[in-house]
Protein backbone atom coordinates (compact mmCIF):
# COMPACT_ATOMS: atom_id res chain seq x y z
CA UNK A 1 0.00 0.00 0.00
CA UNK A 2 1.25 3.44 -0.92
CA UNK A 3 0.63 5.09 2.43
CA UNK A 4 2.97 2.54 4.04
CA UNK A 5 5.77 3.58 1.69
CA UNK A 6 5.10 7.23 2.54
CA UNK A 7 5.27 6.58 6.28
CA UNK A 8 8.39 4.42 5.88
CA UNK A 9 10.32 7.19 4.11
CA UNK A 10 9.19 9.76 6.68
CA UNK A 11 10.34 7.53 9.55
CA UNK A 12 13.75 7.10 7.92
CA UNK A 13 14.10 10.88 7.49
CA UNK A 14 12.94 11.46 11.06
CA UNK A 15 15.54 9.04 12.44
CA UNK A 16 18.39 10.80 10.64
CA UNK A 17 16.97 14.20 11.53
CA UNK A 18 16.52 13.33 15.20
CA UNK A 19 20.10 12.07 15.50
CA UNK A 20 21.37 15.26 13.87
CA UNK A 21 19.22 17.54 16.03
CA UNK A 22 20.24 15.80 19.25
CA UNK A 23 23.83 16.35 18.18
CA UNK A 24 23.14 20.04 17.56
CA UNK A 25 21.38 20.37 20.92
CA UNK A 26 24.57 19.05 22.57
CA UNK A 27 26.37 22.28 21.66
CA UNK A 28 25.23 23.76 24.95
CA UNK A 29 26.48 20.73 26.87
CA UNK A 30 29.87 20.92 25.15
CA UNK A 31 30.14 24.63 25.98
CA UNK A 32 29.37 23.96 29.63
CA UNK A 33 25.70 24.83 29.97
CA UNK A 34 22.59 22.71 29.70
CA UNK A 35 22.39 18.96 30.15
CA UNK A 36 22.18 15.95 27.82
CA UNK A 37 18.86 14.96 29.38
CA UNK A 38 17.31 18.35 28.63
CA UNK A 39 18.67 18.30 25.07
CA UNK A 40 17.14 14.90 24.37
CA UNK A 41 13.89 15.84 26.11
CA UNK A 42 13.47 19.03 24.04
CA UNK A 43 13.75 17.05 20.81
CA UNK A 44 11.51 14.26 22.12
CA UNK A 45 8.82 16.70 23.25
CA UNK A 46 8.65 18.34 19.82
CA UNK A 47 8.38 14.92 18.19
CA UNK A 48 5.59 13.86 20.55
CA UNK A 49 3.58 17.06 19.99
CA UNK A 50 4.02 16.76 16.22
CA UNK A 51 3.02 13.09 16.38
CA UNK A 52 -0.13 14.09 18.25
CA UNK A 53 -1.04 16.58 15.51
CA UNK A 54 -0.33 13.87 12.92
CA UNK A 55 -2.68 11.44 14.66
CA UNK A 56 -5.42 14.05 14.99
CA UNK A 57 -5.11 15.14 11.34
CA UNK A 58 -5.03 11.54 10.10
CA UNK A 59 -8.21 10.73 12.03
CA UNK A 60 -10.25 13.59 10.53
CA UNK A 61 -12.00 12.71 7.28
CA UNK A 62 -10.18 14.81 4.71
CA UNK A 63 -13.34 16.16 3.06
CA UNK A 64 -13.98 18.17 6.22
CA UNK A 65 -11.22 20.49 4.97
CA UNK A 66 -13.36 21.29 1.94
CA UNK A 67 -16.18 22.76 4.00
CA UNK A 68 -16.45 26.50 3.32
CA UNK A 69 -16.88 27.39 6.99
CA UNK A 70 -13.86 25.29 7.96
CA UNK A 71 -11.70 26.84 5.25
CA UNK A 72 -12.77 30.34 6.25
CA UNK A 73 -11.92 29.48 9.84
CA UNK A 74 -8.45 28.25 8.85
CA UNK A 75 -7.91 31.36 6.73
CA UNK A 76 -9.04 33.77 9.47
CA UNK A 77 -6.99 32.10 12.21
CA UNK A 78 -3.88 32.02 10.00
CA UNK A 79 -4.16 35.71 9.15
CA UNK A 80 -4.77 36.49 12.83
CA UNK A 81 -1.69 34.54 13.90
CA UNK A 82 0.47 36.15 11.22
CA UNK A 83 -0.82 39.59 12.17
CA UNK A 84 -0.27 38.92 15.88
CA UNK A 85 3.46 38.48 15.34
CA UNK A 86 3.72 42.24 14.74
CA UNK A 87 2.43 42.93 18.25
CA UNK A 88 3.74 40.07 20.36
CA UNK A 89 7.24 39.37 19.06
CA UNK A 90 10.59 41.08 18.66
CA UNK A 91 12.06 42.95 15.70
CA UNK A 92 11.77 39.89 13.46
CA UNK A 93 8.00 39.33 13.49
CA UNK A 94 8.05 35.58 12.89
CA UNK A 95 7.32 33.86 16.21
CA UNK A 96 4.64 33.82 18.85
CA UNK A 97 5.09 32.58 22.40
CA UNK A 98 2.19 30.29 23.32
CA UNK A 99 2.15 28.34 26.61
CA UNK A 100 5.91 28.48 26.81
CA UNK A 101 6.41 27.32 23.21
CA UNK A 102 7.49 29.31 20.15
CA UNK A 103 5.12 29.09 17.19
CA UNK A 104 6.00 30.27 13.69
CA UNK A 105 2.65 30.84 11.94
CA UNK A 106 4.25 31.00 8.48
CA UNK A 107 5.03 27.27 8.71
CA UNK A 108 1.37 26.43 9.32
CA UNK A 109 0.40 28.86 6.56
CA UNK A 110 2.10 26.57 4.02
CA UNK A 111 -0.37 23.79 4.78
CA UNK A 112 -3.28 26.24 4.68
CA UNK A 113 -2.23 27.44 1.23
CA UNK A 114 -2.19 23.83 -0.02
CA UNK A 115 -5.74 23.39 1.34
CA UNK A 116 -6.89 26.68 -0.21
CA UNK A 117 -5.50 25.97 -3.67
CA UNK A 118 -6.63 22.34 -3.59
CA UNK A 119 -10.17 23.42 -2.77
CA UNK A 120 -10.12 26.23 -5.33
CA UNK A 121 -8.91 24.04 -8.20
CA UNK A 122 -11.40 21.31 -7.27
CA UNK A 123 -14.28 23.75 -7.78
CA UNK A 124 -12.94 25.86 -10.67
CA UNK A 125 -14.11 24.89 -14.16
CA UNK A 126 -12.14 27.47 -16.17
CA UNK A 127 -8.51 26.99 -15.13
CA UNK A 128 -7.34 27.89 -18.64
CA UNK A 129 -8.33 31.56 -18.25
CA UNK A 130 -5.81 34.01 -16.80
CA UNK A 131 -8.24 35.34 -14.19
CA UNK A 132 -9.60 32.00 -12.95
CA UNK A 133 -6.47 29.96 -13.51
CA UNK A 134 -3.90 32.28 -11.93
CA UNK A 135 -4.82 35.78 -10.86
CA UNK A 136 -7.87 35.07 -8.71
CA UNK A 137 -6.31 32.25 -6.61
CA UNK A 138 -3.10 34.24 -6.18
CA UNK A 139 -5.14 37.18 -4.90
CA UNK A 140 -6.71 34.80 -2.39
CA UNK A 141 -3.31 33.79 -0.95
CA UNK A 142 -1.73 37.25 -1.39
CA UNK A 143 -2.62 38.50 2.14
CA UNK A 144 -0.73 35.51 3.57
CA UNK A 145 2.23 36.07 1.25
CA UNK A 146 2.28 39.80 2.06
CA UNK A 147 2.18 39.37 5.85
CA UNK A 148 5.00 36.83 5.72
CA UNK A 149 7.07 39.01 3.38
CA UNK A 150 6.96 42.01 5.71
CA UNK A 151 7.86 40.00 8.85
CA UNK A 152 10.42 40.05 7.10
CA UNK A 153 10.62 36.52 5.66
CA UNK A 154 10.99 37.03 1.94
CA UNK A 155 12.22 33.49 1.26
CA UNK A 156 9.14 31.83 2.77
CA UNK A 157 6.78 34.22 0.97
CA UNK A 158 8.47 33.45 -2.36
CA UNK A 159 8.36 29.73 -1.61
CA UNK A 160 4.61 29.90 -0.94
CA UNK A 161 4.08 31.90 -4.13
CA UNK A 162 6.10 29.34 -6.12
CA UNK A 163 4.16 26.49 -4.52
CA UNK A 164 0.88 28.19 -5.47
CA UNK A 165 1.92 28.67 -9.09
CA UNK A 166 3.12 25.06 -9.41
CA UNK A 167 -0.17 23.75 -8.03
CA UNK A 168 -2.22 25.98 -10.33
CA UNK A 169 -0.21 24.92 -13.38
CA UNK A 170 -0.66 21.26 -12.43
CA UNK A 171 -4.41 21.87 -12.08
CA UNK A 172 -4.70 23.27 -15.60
CA UNK A 173 -3.45 26.87 -15.72
CA UNK A 174 -2.02 27.69 -19.15
CA UNK A 175 1.77 27.66 -19.49
CA UNK A 176 1.76 30.99 -21.34
CA UNK A 177 -0.13 32.58 -18.44
CA UNK A 178 2.35 31.13 -15.95
CA UNK A 179 5.29 32.51 -17.96
CA UNK A 180 3.62 35.93 -18.09
CA UNK A 181 3.05 35.94 -14.34
CA UNK A 182 6.55 34.68 -13.49
CA UNK A 183 8.01 37.27 -15.83
CA UNK A 184 6.10 39.99 -14.00
CA UNK A 185 7.32 38.75 -10.61
CA UNK A 186 10.92 38.60 -11.85
CA UNK A 187 10.62 42.14 -13.22
CA UNK A 188 9.35 43.43 -9.88
CA UNK A 189 12.17 41.54 -8.18
CA UNK A 190 14.70 43.18 -10.47
CA UNK A 191 13.27 46.63 -9.74
CA UNK A 192 13.43 45.94 -6.01
CA UNK A 193 17.03 44.77 -6.34
CA UNK A 194 18.10 47.58 -8.65
CA UNK A 195 16.61 50.43 -6.63
CA UNK A 196 16.74 48.87 -3.14
CA UNK A 197 12.96 48.90 -2.83
CA UNK A 198 11.27 46.65 -0.28
CA UNK A 199 14.40 44.58 0.37
CA UNK A 200 16.09 44.87 3.76
CA UNK A 201 19.78 45.71 4.08
CA UNK A 202 20.87 42.18 4.98
CA UNK A 203 18.79 40.79 2.11
CA UNK A 204 20.50 43.13 -0.32
CA UNK A 205 23.90 42.14 1.03
CA UNK A 206 23.18 38.45 0.60
CA UNK A 207 21.94 38.95 -2.98
CA UNK A 208 24.88 41.16 -3.91
CA UNK A 209 27.37 38.62 -2.57
CA UNK A 210 25.59 35.79 -4.34
CA UNK A 211 25.42 37.49 -7.74
CA UNK A 212 29.10 38.44 -7.43
CA UNK A 213 29.92 34.77 -6.94
CA UNK A 214 31.13 35.21 -3.38
CA UNK A 215 30.36 32.40 -0.96
CA UNK A 216 29.83 33.45 2.63
CA UNK A 217 32.03 32.03 5.35
CA UNK A 218 29.02 30.06 6.62
CA UNK A 219 28.64 28.25 3.30
CA UNK A 220 32.35 27.53 2.94
CA UNK A 221 32.52 26.11 6.47
CA UNK A 222 29.39 24.02 5.88
CA UNK A 223 30.81 22.53 2.68
CA UNK A 224 34.12 21.71 4.35
CA UNK A 225 32.29 20.20 7.30
CA UNK A 226 30.20 17.94 5.07
CA UNK A 227 33.30 16.86 3.11
CA UNK A 228 35.28 16.13 6.27
CA UNK A 229 32.93 13.28 7.19
CA UNK A 230 34.16 11.15 4.31
CA UNK A 231 32.22 8.08 3.31
CA UNK A 232 30.98 6.88 6.70
CA UNK A 233 31.19 10.04 8.84
CA UNK A 234 32.81 10.72 12.18
CA UNK A 235 29.90 9.36 14.17
CA UNK A 236 26.83 10.86 15.85
CA UNK A 237 27.72 13.81 18.11
CA UNK A 238 31.39 13.61 17.11
CA UNK A 239 31.25 16.37 14.52
CA UNK A 240 32.80 19.79 15.07
CA UNK A 241 31.26 21.94 12.35
CA UNK A 242 28.12 22.53 14.43
CA UNK A 243 30.28 24.55 16.84
CA UNK A 244 31.32 27.16 14.28
CA UNK A 245 28.59 27.47 11.65
CA UNK A 246 25.75 29.90 12.56
CA UNK A 247 22.16 28.57 12.23
CA UNK A 248 23.55 25.11 11.56
CA UNK A 249 20.34 23.70 13.04
CA UNK A 250 18.24 24.98 10.12
CA UNK A 251 19.98 26.31 7.00
CA UNK A 252 23.07 24.11 7.22
CA UNK A 253 21.87 20.92 8.87
CA UNK A 254 23.14 18.97 5.85
CA UNK A 255 26.65 19.86 6.99
CA UNK A 256 26.01 18.09 10.30
CA UNK A 257 24.60 15.05 8.49
CA UNK A 258 27.58 14.95 6.12
CA UNK A 259 30.19 15.30 8.85
CA UNK A 260 28.67 12.84 11.32
CA UNK A 261 26.97 10.32 9.01
CA UNK A 262 29.18 10.77 5.95
CA UNK A 263 28.34 10.75 2.27
CA UNK A 264 26.24 7.65 2.93
CA UNK A 265 24.05 9.65 5.33
CA UNK A 266 23.59 12.42 2.76
CA UNK A 267 22.74 9.94 -0.02
CA UNK A 268 20.30 8.02 2.21
CA UNK A 269 18.37 11.12 3.26
CA UNK A 270 18.25 12.58 -0.26
CA UNK A 271 17.04 9.25 -1.68
CA UNK A 272 14.46 9.12 1.11
CA UNK A 273 13.13 12.53 0.08
CA UNK A 274 13.07 11.39 -3.54
CA UNK A 275 11.21 8.22 -2.58
CA UNK A 276 8.77 10.19 -0.43
CA UNK A 277 7.93 12.68 -3.18
CA UNK A 278 7.60 9.86 -5.73
CA UNK A 279 5.31 7.85 -3.43
CA UNK A 280 3.15 10.90 -2.75
CA UNK A 281 2.70 11.75 -6.42
CA UNK A 282 2.12 8.08 -7.30
CA UNK A 283 -0.56 7.89 -4.62
CA UNK A 284 -2.23 11.03 -5.92
CA UNK A 285 -2.25 9.83 -9.51
CA UNK A 286 -3.11 6.15 -9.04
CA UNK A 287 -5.25 6.02 -5.92
CA UNK A 288 -7.03 9.32 -5.34
CA UNK A 289 -9.90 10.17 -7.66
CA UNK A 290 -11.41 13.40 -6.32
CA UNK A 291 -9.61 16.58 -7.29
CA UNK A 292 -9.22 18.01 -3.78
CA UNK A 293 -7.45 14.94 -2.40
CA UNK A 294 -5.31 14.59 -5.50
CA UNK A 295 -4.21 18.24 -5.47
CA UNK A 296 -3.54 18.29 -1.73
CA UNK A 297 -1.13 15.35 -1.98
CA UNK A 298 0.57 16.84 -5.05
CA UNK A 299 0.85 20.23 -3.31
CA UNK A 300 2.33 18.58 -0.21
CA UNK A 301 4.86 16.75 -2.41
CA UNK A 302 5.75 20.02 -4.13
CA UNK A 303 6.28 21.70 -0.75
CA UNK A 304 8.72 19.01 0.36
CA UNK A 305 10.49 19.07 -3.00
CA UNK A 306 10.86 22.86 -2.99
CA UNK A 307 12.16 23.05 0.56
CA UNK A 308 14.70 20.27 0.03
CA UNK A 309 15.93 21.92 -3.17
CA UNK A 310 16.28 25.32 -1.50
CA UNK A 311 17.89 24.00 1.69
CA UNK A 312 20.40 21.86 -0.19
CA UNK A 313 21.00 24.73 -2.62
CA UNK A 314 21.87 27.03 0.28
CA UNK A 315 24.14 24.40 1.89
CA UNK A 316 26.10 24.01 -1.34
CA UNK A 317 26.26 27.69 -2.24
CA UNK A 318 24.00 27.34 -5.27
CA UNK A 319 21.39 29.66 -3.72
CA UNK A 320 21.56 32.68 -1.40
CA UNK A 321 21.12 32.02 2.32
CA UNK A 322 17.37 31.93 2.91
CA UNK A 323 16.33 30.29 6.19
CA UNK A 324 14.20 27.54 4.62
CA UNK A 325 14.12 24.42 6.77
CA UNK A 326 14.89 20.86 5.70
CA UNK A 327 11.56 19.00 6.07
CA UNK A 328 11.27 16.73 9.14
CA UNK A 329 14.93 17.44 9.99
CA UNK A 330 15.79 21.06 10.77
CA UNK A 331 15.34 22.26 14.32
CA UNK A 332 12.10 24.12 14.79
CA UNK A 333 8.94 22.69 16.27
CA UNK A 334 6.68 24.72 13.99
CA UNK A 335 8.19 23.26 10.82
CA UNK A 336 7.96 19.69 12.11
CA UNK A 337 4.43 20.27 13.41
CA UNK A 338 3.28 21.66 10.05
CA UNK A 339 4.79 18.83 8.01
CA UNK A 340 3.41 16.17 10.36
CA UNK A 341 -0.04 17.78 10.23
CA UNK A 342 0.11 17.79 6.43
CA UNK A 343 1.27 14.18 6.49
CA UNK A 344 -1.73 13.31 8.65
CA UNK A 345 -4.11 14.77 6.05
CA UNK A 346 -2.26 12.92 3.28
CA UNK A 347 -2.45 9.64 5.21
CA UNK A 348 -6.19 10.06 5.71
CA UNK A 349 -6.72 10.74 2.01
CA UNK A 350 -4.70 7.72 0.88
CA UNK A 351 -6.00 5.38 3.58
CA UNK A 352 -9.61 6.40 2.88
CA UNK A 353 -9.25 5.66 -0.81
CA UNK A 354 -7.43 2.35 -0.31
CA UNK A 355 -10.08 1.32 2.25
CA UNK A 356 -12.86 2.14 -0.22
CA UNK A 357 -11.16 0.03 -2.90
CA UNK A 358 -10.69 -2.84 -0.45
Image (tube, helix red, strand yellow):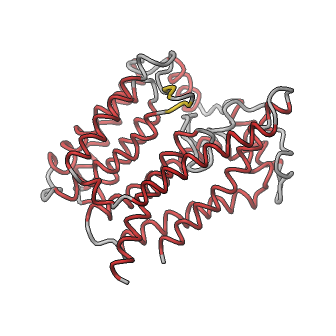
Residue at image location 41% in from the left, 16% down from the top: 87
Residue 44 coordinates in the image, percent (x, y) = 67, 46
Residue at the (50%, 22%) spot, across then down: 204
Q: Kindly give the residue lying farthest to the bottom in the view shown.
A: 358
> If the image is split into quadrants, where does the C terminus sit?
bottom left
For the question of whether residue 326 can be seen, the reply is yes
Residue 251, relative to residue 32: is it above or below?
Answer: below
In this view, 287 is above or below 266:
below
Rendering coords of residue 124 (x, y %): 16, 56
Residue at 57% across / 32% down in the picture? Answer: 210
Residue 178 appears at what percent x and percent y?
27, 49
Residue 190 in sight here:
no
The image quadrant of residue 266 is: bottom right
108 or 224, nearer to the observer: 108
Q: Left or right of 6: which side holds 68? A: left
Q: Residue 205 in the image: x percent, y percent?
A: 55, 22
Q: Is residue 225 left or right of residue 151?
A: right
Amino acid sequence: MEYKAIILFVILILVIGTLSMISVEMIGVIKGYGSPEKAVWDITLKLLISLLFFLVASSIYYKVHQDKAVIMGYYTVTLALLGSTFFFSGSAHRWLRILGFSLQPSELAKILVIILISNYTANCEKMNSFWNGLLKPILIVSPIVFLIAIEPDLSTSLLILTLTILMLYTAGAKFSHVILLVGGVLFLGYISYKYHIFLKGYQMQRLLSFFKGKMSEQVLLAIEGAKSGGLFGKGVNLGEIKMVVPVVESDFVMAVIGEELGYIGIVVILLSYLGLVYSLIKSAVKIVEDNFGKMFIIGYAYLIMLQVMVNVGVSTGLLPITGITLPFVSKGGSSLLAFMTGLGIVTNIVFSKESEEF
